[in-house]
Amino acid sequence: MEYLFYSLWFWIGLIAVVAIISGVITNAVNKSNETKRYVADAAHGGSYKKLAEESAAANARLLSTLSAVEGRLASIEKTLTDIP
């Protein structure tokens, strides 16, 4: 039995097993923390709320510009239909 602990292959195998187990545990903890951050961000609106507000403002500016263009086109159409 004492010979087992002096064997190089025993220690190489033990280090490999410990490395694999610690890698699995580290990965599980990282995934858990990533999920918690994602859930917390989504619960508070996160950056999605800010993005939605910015795109709503951009859409409002676009609608006002399109309304102005529509008015100009209507006046051009009226002018063209009035020409005999």
Image (tube, rainbow, N blue to C red):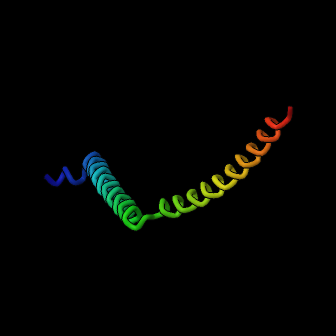
Q: Is residue 1 left or right of residue 15?
A: left
Where, by quadrant of the figure, is residue 45 drawn? bottom left
Q: Is residue 32 left or right of residue 74?
A: left
Toward the bottom, the furthest residue is: 44
Question: Residue drawn 76% across and 47% down?
Answer: 72
Q: Foreground: 15 or 68?
A: 68
Quadrant where the C terminus is found in the figure:
top right
Q: Is residue 34 left or right of residue 73?
A: left
Question: Residue drawn 32% across and 59% down?
Answer: 32
Toward the right, the furthest residue is: 84
Where, by quadrant of the figure, is residue 31 drawn? bottom left
Q: Is residue 15 left or right of residue 4?
A: right
Q: Residue 29, image x and y in percent?
A: 32, 60
Question: Residue drawn 45% across and 64% down?
Answer: 46
Q: Residue 74, image x and y in percent?
A: 73, 44
Please determine whether, in this image, residue 70 is positioned above or below residue 49. Answer: above
Q: Foreground: 41 or 6?
A: 41
The answer to whether residue 49 of the structure is visible from this angle is: yes
The answer to whether residue 11 of the structure is visible from this angle is: no
Please determine whether, in this image, residue 68 is positioned above or below residue 80. Answer: below
Q: Residue 83, image x and y in percent?
A: 85, 35
Please determine whether, in this image, residue 26 is positioned above or below residue 66. Answer: below
Q: Residue 57, image x and y in percent?
A: 60, 60
Tally of numbered discs: 0
Q: Foreground: 78 or 42?
A: 78
Q: Foreground: 29 or 74?
A: 74
Question: Residue drawn 66% across and 55% down?
Answer: 64
